Image (cartoon, coloured by chain):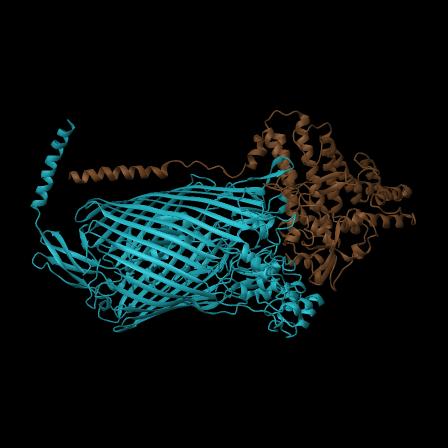
Chain colours: A brown, B cyan
């Protein structure tokens, strides 16, 4: 009997220890891998968190940004992607065989999702700054909020131009209650309203963080430059001029002065995905872009390199490689003085064509070209303006949008029988 | 004082004990246990019924057992033989026993709860058991999962690629989840094994997935069950669905694979040495277009014509893959012990070279299993396994930078010279994106494992008398490994040399994974006078999991240096996955004279992985088996029918959401001079819970002619509810996905087996046919129907839509289709096979044994994107054949491209992936023992794996998967590592 009691005690102790295992409470395991968004938005953000969110917002603008520029530049036949990495770059995107764009393919969705991700990140910063328990002056709080709202509007504007008449949602503050799709013109008005609200917030704002776009004053100028762009898309030249005066526009200044996406190597930084390795990465300028470039046009010659042997695939062939980025950490322009000067010129067409031509000639002189001395009627100056924009802003995603707003998509060349020029990108299937 | 107390207390006890012993009458039973041929069976178990008294036979099959009283009932059992009951008494104590072979495996013991077993004859489920002989007896096996093909019904097994070192997907009874891990739970001697496939981090170079994300599923990682040495395994039991696996609750939705390793056998030490040497070769090569100078000029222009005329053709496919690498396996088994302690030592050294140069798999595995009986109430079994392995995987699958060997090969013109000139660097091949010979020669992609799996189980018989027994079972185990991944893309690669390129990449990853487990159970058995056995078990389980992966990626390497700090830039990636599960299990069994058997049980589980960590989720089970042949006078025991069982089983099991599903994380970044945070594309769901599977299965087992012909059929219906769906959310929210419990699906299937021994004697023939078929249907979908897997609709994707099969493959609607413009997709196929069949046959004549296994997978489609890539390179092997174009005008290459580009038709690359394979064949000769004076036994053999492969699929292997184990993407092929077949030569000697 004693033998039994020894093992009974032994067994009972063991089982007792085990039976308490499931009855004890399990503590929730917080995410060990990343900070929690909900906590940051609901008042948990410290000043240092706000700084992280502000820098993160500038960084998220770079996510898949190449897809915005690749798709718009290729549809506008500024250049081709002959890398063969995905057949859709020479197929679907160029409307091969008259085909449309897939509303669930990456050509459409990568860029769309990335722009709205930036919008979400901007809202997180706005909410975090509004609700933060940290002691912030109104000017400091508004610095974060106005900055975020400016970049939010910029991201919406990018996708607005891809979606065009499909329209976009501009009110997406609450992911559970998304606003309606607004047609192109209405969306532009909403974006303008957002920019103006941000502009007010940036009045006298003080930055507690380091912006890669520049000082608080420069970001305020950038906000006005974006507003001028919006008015340009709306076709309201009269509204552009006063906005441009609040920017760094300077016909005699450095054409490259502006705000840029910045890149860097290492860690969580991002290298410039739009950099093409010389003789290797197979982006080639469209032959028409090559053939209509004026001899000695520095704008084109500095952005391209003639190849010894052409790159070719899928019935397309080109021997001028796009080399607009000097390195994989070179910054990529968002808005430069050159564009502001050309916007100034465009705003003057119809009211002061001489001023328009004067501005155009400043740009041409900077490119090492002789002054324009052709006719100065509205149509002629507009034609010339489009020519200058084509080369000044080569590879910066403008050609297709410019041709569309002047109803000239029919003039964009197609290269193979059956190819078409898309007017807009389809609304992604999950956003119907 | 102390001493006094001890003496005072113990002495009377001792006296009492001794006198009790002396007072008991006893006698000794003895005899010999042999098989039908009269050979002694060593290691047979002799147990006194109703007690824990027992012994095992010695090398000659003899036994001696001291028994109390004057008479007793002994049960004599031996694996693979029918159990015999024997009445012995002091007057009739010497009895020899002849055991009959158990062809139907009815006396095999199968798990029925977490702490109990049941005889197969009494089982209410269709549980497959695979013995060591079936697993590794025919041919040499690289990995445990790879050894399972065709050996049990109800599974769909795929090899993701031909890369050495594993990478398999095992799916039981259809799709059981859309986004969850569908792989079964692997349990070795009670220890939960980690079976993750952990990223290699090569995506920075291949850019197969967006943004160069280090966490990528396209990099052909192996899954960790590959570490387990198949030679260590004694048997495998497979619980295919919830009706059998409910005891494992939240981890059992993919089925459970219960592995038991070899144990020592009491008796003289037995040593077995075996050596295998094998040679591999590709199962298929695809070839080239029939190039002529004119054809080259027509396709690529005059410059290429010149190069062609100058260089001629090089068949790079042959150069890369048409090799005959050697593989060797050296194995030693030592086993022995006495009546108290038994031990088993197993050691394996394996070295398998891959088809592609510089790839291969090398493994050292050592095992020590010890069993010890401390006394008549406590015994402990301890298992230890250490594994060290290295797999050089090569660089294959999808690449958006044309850098993987497979991908660049599709664009490599065979008239280009890829060899280095004058001993220098390899030339850059811009038209292909990279130089495939250079990649094969210089790129390293390695997985290295150090793993320890060990555990202990203690059986404590707390109390027993004639009618009752109370037992405790306590088990603890650990599975710990360190995985090191090393990917090196040296700086002198043609696409790494130039400024502005990545400048050489070194990716160094380390994963430390620790699973620990502690279980405790009480089992109470009560036998009534009426022959009813009642067994109750209840217990608790606790499992902790911790995984920590750090991947360091260095770019811009300093010359030939490969250390991550010898570089221009370093980035790091870390993921930690802690998880704690707690649960309980209780089960009541009822057995009336083996005639009617009932079991009901329930498992409750909670886990930190659920949105609510302290919510218990319950998983019930119930089953019933009726053995008609055990009833008196129901079936004539001397008639043709020897066994007739009806069975029905029901159970539930679950699957956890993934670790991240409940979080809204912020992503770390860096810009300018500052750190930053931005939002993640996945929106968290704090309400997320496990998927729930409910399965009912019915079946019957029929045996004829003393079970020399056995027939079993099982039909199951498996419903999965609360399916975890990574629902696409409107992207204008700023998110792209969110995990919701928002769907349901049903699998139904039938499994039929026929096993027979048509001829027995000097010539013996065993044969078996298995048939299994599964169909699935999405029964509930709370989110809009969606496509997933693959790359884009036009390239073929799976579609999840209510009413469709879960494995439906769809594509874009062709322009010449009547539905063009109205339908958003067109159904092109289904990845689920129509059915699987396998045929096993083994013949033995004298000392010769021949065994073969044929596996037929009929139907089931796959998306073959390799051909399309080759077509874009205008180099496809069948580019000029005219077998696809219904008009017979276009070559296959131009036709495929035109269908995709011009006609938005996805048909040409969705292909039938069915096959018939001679999975295994082995011929062995055993040299008679007398040749070695009865001191040794030597066996010689030759065997083969996948020697005959018949399929229409237009690439290397219809099983290839670009997306690894992701079940709803794994029928997608993008330029994989080609598969190999192998011939092995064996020599085994036992002493």
Residue A9 position within the rendered picture, expressed as x and y whole percent measured from the top left: 23, 37
Horizontal side of B881 relative to B513 (left or right) equals right
In-front residue for pair B623/B171: B171
Horizontal side of B607 relative to B789 (left or right) equals left
In-front residue for pair B703/B107: B107
Residue A136 position within the rendered picture, expressed as x and y whole percent measured from the top left: 63, 25
| Quadrant housing the N terminus of chain A | top left
Q: How many marks?
A: 0
Horizontal side of B59 relative to A384 (left or right) equals left
Residue A430 position within the rendered picture, expressed as x and y whole percent measured from the top left: 62, 50
Residue at 57%, 67% (x, y): give it: B315
Residue B799 in view in this figure: no
Above or below, A194 against B787 in this view is: above
- Of all residues shown, which one is farthest toward the front? B422
Horizontal side of A11 relative to B828 (left or right) equals left
Residue B930 position within the rendered picture, expressed as x and y whole percent measured from the top left: 22, 68
In-front residue for pair B635/A128: A128
Residue at 79%, 55% (x, y): give it: A290
- Of all residues shown, which one is farthest toward the bottom? B888
Residue A72 in view in this figure: yes
Above or below, A277 against B981 in this view is: above
């Amino acid at each position: 009997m004693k033998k039994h009691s020894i093992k009974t005690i032994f067994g009972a102790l063991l089982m007792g220890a085990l039976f308490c295992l499931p009855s004890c409470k399990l503590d929730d395991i917080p995410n060990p891998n990343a900070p929690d968004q909900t906590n940051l938005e609901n008042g948990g953000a410290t000043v240092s968190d706000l700084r992280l969110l502000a820098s993160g917002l500038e960084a998220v603008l770079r996510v898949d940004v190449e897809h915005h520029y690749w798709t718009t530049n290729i549809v506008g036949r500024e250049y081709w992607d002959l890398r063969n990495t995905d057949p859709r770059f020479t197929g679907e995107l160029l409307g091969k065989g008259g085909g449309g764009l897939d509303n669930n393919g990456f050509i459409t969705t990568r860029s769309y999702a990335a722009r709205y991700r930036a919008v979400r990140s901007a809202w997180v910063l706005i909410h975090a700054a509004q609700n933060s328990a940290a002691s912030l002056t109104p000017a400091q709080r508004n610095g974060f909020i106005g900055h975020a709202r400016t970049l939010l509007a910029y991201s919406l504007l990018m996708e607005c131009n891809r979606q065009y008449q499909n329209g976009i949602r501009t009110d997406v503050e609450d992911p559970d209650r998304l606003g309606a799709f607004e047609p192109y013109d209405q969306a532009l008005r909403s974006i303008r309203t957002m920019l103006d609200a941000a502009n007010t917030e940036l009045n006298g704002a003080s930055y507690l963080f380091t912006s890669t776009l520049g000082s608080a004053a420069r970001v305020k100028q950038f906000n006005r430059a974006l507003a001028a762009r919006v008015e340009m898309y709306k076709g309201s030249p009269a509204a552009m001029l006063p906005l441009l005066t609040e920017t760094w526009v300077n016909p005699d200044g450095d054409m490259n002065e502006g705000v840029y996406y910045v890149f860097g190597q290492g860690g969580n930084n991002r290298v410039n995905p739009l950099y093409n390795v010389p003789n290797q990465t197979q982006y080639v300028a469209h032959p028409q872009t090559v053939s209509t470039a004026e001899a000695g046009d520095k704008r084109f010659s500095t952005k391209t390199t003639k190849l010894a042997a052409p790159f070719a695939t899928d019935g397309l062939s080109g021997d001028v490689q796009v080399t607009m980025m000097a390195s994989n950490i070179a910054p990529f322009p968002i808005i430069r003085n050159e564009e502001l000067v050309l916007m100034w010129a465009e705003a003057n067409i119809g009211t002061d064509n001489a001023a328009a031509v004067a501005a155009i000639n400043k740009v041409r002189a900077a490119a090492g070209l002789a002054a324009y001395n052709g006719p100065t009627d509205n149509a002629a100056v507009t034609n010339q303006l489009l020519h200058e924009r084509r080369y000044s802003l080569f590879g910066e995603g403008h050609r297709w949008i410019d041709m569309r707003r002047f109803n000239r998509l029919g003039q964009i060349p197609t290269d193979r029988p059956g190819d078409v020029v898309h007017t807009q990108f389809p609304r992604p299937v999950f956003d119907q | 004082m102390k001493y006094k107390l001890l003496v005072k207390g113990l002495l009377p006890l001792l006296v009492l004990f001794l006198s009790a012993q002396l007072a008991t009458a006893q006698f000794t039973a003895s005899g010999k246990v042999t098989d039908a041929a009269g050979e002694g069976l060593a290691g047979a178990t002799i147990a006194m019924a109703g007690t824990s008294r027992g012994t095992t036979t010695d090398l000659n099959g003899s036994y001696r057992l001291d028994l109390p009283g004057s008479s007793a009932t002994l049960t004599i059992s031996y694996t693979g033989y029918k159990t015999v009951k024997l009445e012995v008494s002091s007057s009739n104590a010497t009895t020899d026993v002849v055991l009959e072979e158990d062809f139907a495996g009815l006396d095999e013991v199968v798990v029925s709860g977490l702490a109990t077993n049941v005889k197969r004859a009494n089982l209410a489920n269709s549980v497959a058991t695979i013995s060591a002989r079936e697993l590794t007896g025919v041919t040499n096996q690289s990995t445990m999962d790879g050894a399972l093909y065709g050996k049990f019904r109800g599974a769909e097994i795929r090899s993701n690629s031909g890369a050495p070192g594993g990478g398999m997907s095992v799916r039981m009874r259809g799709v059981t989840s859309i986004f969850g891990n569908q792989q079964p739970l692997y349990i070795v001697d009670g220890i939960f094994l980690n079976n993750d496939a952990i990223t290699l981090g090569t995506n920075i170079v291949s850019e197969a997935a967006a943004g160069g994300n280090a966490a990528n599923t396209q990099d052909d990682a192996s899954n960790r069950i590959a570490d387990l040495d198949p030679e260590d395994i004694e048997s495998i039991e497979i619980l295919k669905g919830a009706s059998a696996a409910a005891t494992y609750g939240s981890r059992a939705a993919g089925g459970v694979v219960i592995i038991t390793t070899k144990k020592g056998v009491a008796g003289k030490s037995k040593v077995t040495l075996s050596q295998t040497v094998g040679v591999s070769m590709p199962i298929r090569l695809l070839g080239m277009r029939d190039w002529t100078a004119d054809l080259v000029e027509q396709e690529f222009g005059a410059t290429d014509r010149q190069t062609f005329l100058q260089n001629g053709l090089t068949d790079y496919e042959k150069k890369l893959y048409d090799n005959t690498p050697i593989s060797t396996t050296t194995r030693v088994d030592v086993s022995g012990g006495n009546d108290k302690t038994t031990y088993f030592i197993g050691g394996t050294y394996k070295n398998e070279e891959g088809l592609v140069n510089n790839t291969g798999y090398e493994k050292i595995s050592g095992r020590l299993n010890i069993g010890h009986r401390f006394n008549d109430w406590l015994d402990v079994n301890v298992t230890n396994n250490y594994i060290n392995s290295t797999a050089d995987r090569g660089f294959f699958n999808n690449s958006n930078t044309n850098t993987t060997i497979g991908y660049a090969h599709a664009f490599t013109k065979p008239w280009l010279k890829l060899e280095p000139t004058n001993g220098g660097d390899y030339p850059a091949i811009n038209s292909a994106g990279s130089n495939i010979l250079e990649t094969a020669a210089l790129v390293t992609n390695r997985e290295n494992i150090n793993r320890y799996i060990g555990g202990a189980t203690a059986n404590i018989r707390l109390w027993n008398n004639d009618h009752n027994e109370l037992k405790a079972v306590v088990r603890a185990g650990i599975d710990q490994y360190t995985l090191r991944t090393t990917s090196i893309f040296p700086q002198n690669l043609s696409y790494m040399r130039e400024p502005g390129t990545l400048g050489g990449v070194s990716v160094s990853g380390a994963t430390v994974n620790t699973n620990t487990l502690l279980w405790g159970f009480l089992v109470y058995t009560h036998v009534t006078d009426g022959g009813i056995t009642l067994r109750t078990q209840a217990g608790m389980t606790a499992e902790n999991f911790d995984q920590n992966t750090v991947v360091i990626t260095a770019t811009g390497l300093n010359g030939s240096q490969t250390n991550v700090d010898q570089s221009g830039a370093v980035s790091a990636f870390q993921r930690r996955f802690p998880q704690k599960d707690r649960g309980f299990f209780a089960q009541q069994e009822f057995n009336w004279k083996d005639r009617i058997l009932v079991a009901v049980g329930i498992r409750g589980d909670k886990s930190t992985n659920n949105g609510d960590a302290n919510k218990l989720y319950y998983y019930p089970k119930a089953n019933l088996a009726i053995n008609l042949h055990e009833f008196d006078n129901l079936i004539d025991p001397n008639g043709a029918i020897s066994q007739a069982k009806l069975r029905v089983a029901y159970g539930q099991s679950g699957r956890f959401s993934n670790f991240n599903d409940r979080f809204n994380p912020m992503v770390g970044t860096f810009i300018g001079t500052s750190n930053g945070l931005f939002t993640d594309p996945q929106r968290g769901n704090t309400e997320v819970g496990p998927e729930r599977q409910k399965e009912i299965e019915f079946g019957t087992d029929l045996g004829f002619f003393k079970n020399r012909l056995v027939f079993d059929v099982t039909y199951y219906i498996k419903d999965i509810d609360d399916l975890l769906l990574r629902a696409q959310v409107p992207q204008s929210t700023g998110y792209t996905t969110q995990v919701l419990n928002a769907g349901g699906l049903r699998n139904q299937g039938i499994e039929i087996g026929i096993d027979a021994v048509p001829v027995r004697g000097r010539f013996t023939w065993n044969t078996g046919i298995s048939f299994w078929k599964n169909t699935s249907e999405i029964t509930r979908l709370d989110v809009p129907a969606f496509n997933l897997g693959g790359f884009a609709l036009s390239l073929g994707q799976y579609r999840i839509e209510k009413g469709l099969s879960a494995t439906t493959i769809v594509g874009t609607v062709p322009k010449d289709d009547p539905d063009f413009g109205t339908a958003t997709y067109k159904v092109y196929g289904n990845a689920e096979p129509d059915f699987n069949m396998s045929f096993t046959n083994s013949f033995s004549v004298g000392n010769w044994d021949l065994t073969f296994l044929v596996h037929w997978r009929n139907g089931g489609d796959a998306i073959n994107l390799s051909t399309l890539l080759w077509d874009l390179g205008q180099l496809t092997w069948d580019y000029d054949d005219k077998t696809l174009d219904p008009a017979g005008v276009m070559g296959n290459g131009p036709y495929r491209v035109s269908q995709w580009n011009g006609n938005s038709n996805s048909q040409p690359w969705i292909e039938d992936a069915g096959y018939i394979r001679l999975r295994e064949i082995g011929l062995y000769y055993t040299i008679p023992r007398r040749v070695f004076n009865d001191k040794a036994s030597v066996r010689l053999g030759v065997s083969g794996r996948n020697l005959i492969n018949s399929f229409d699929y237009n690439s290397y292997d219809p099983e290839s998967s670009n997306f690894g184990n992701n079940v709803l993407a794994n029928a997608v092929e993008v330029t994989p590592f080609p598969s190999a077949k192998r011939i092995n030569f064996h020599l085994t000697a036992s002493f």
